[in-house]
Amino acid sequence: MTSKSRFRIMPAALLGLMSLMAFSGMAPRAIAADGAALYRGKCAMCHGPAGAGRPGTFPPLAGRVGQIAGNPDGKAYLAAVLLNGLHGPITVDGQSYKGFMPSFRALSDEDIAAVLAYVSTLGNSAATGGISAQDVASVRAAPMDAAAVQAKRAALQTAHVIP
């Protein structure tokens, strides 16, 4: 086999492997989505490594996100927060918070789903983290401004979806 023919076979084999991965549902992006690593790199600096938050500035996530994700409207809200950010005062467990959460819209649907699945398990080992990339994609299709995210939060608190 000549070196020219080797160079023709290698790209063909690589393309075949990629199409096999896509066919089997193992797209390269899905394999790379690691919620724990993404959380450490994007969220832990504010919410803390264990999701305990920082009093008065950043609310706790541990033990809360899994509860919220147990409701379809809660899942949509969580995805909306990551996609659109959260601005303005909120109250969590009687504590007031005035932090600013930026949008993570630049992350893929798979990455956002992976982060939310991971955060759902913080402080809740029984959580399944059932937020899919499709859930995120449907929320991404309808961008919200800060007031809309706050209004959705208020409605979910009234309905006791957000504890």
Image (cartoon, rainbow, N blue to C red):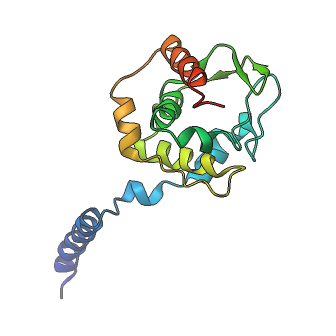
Residue 66 left/right relative to 24: right
The answer to whether residue 37 is seen in the rendering is no
The one of 29 and 162 positioned closer to us in this rendering: 162
Residue 63 drawn at (x, y percent): 70, 44
Residue 119 drawn at (x, y percent): 62, 46
Residue 3 left/right relative to 156: left
Q: Quadrant of residue 22?
A: bottom left
Residue 2, above or below 77: below
The answer to whether residue 39 is seen in the rendering is yes
Residue found at x 58% / y 37%: 68
Residue 33, above or below 46: below
Q: Quadrant of residue 66?
A: top right
Determine the residue located farthest toward the bottom in the rendered image: 1
Residue 141, above or below 31: above
Residue 4 left/right relative to 59: left
Residue 60 drawn at (x, y percent): 74, 35
Residue found at x 17% / y 73%: 8
Residue 19, above or below 113: below
On-image quarter of the C terminus? top right
Q: Quadrant of residue 135?
A: top left
Determine the residue located farthest toward the top in the rendered image: 147
Residue 80 drawn at (x, y percent): 48, 28
The one of 55 and 73 positioned closer to us in this rendering: 73
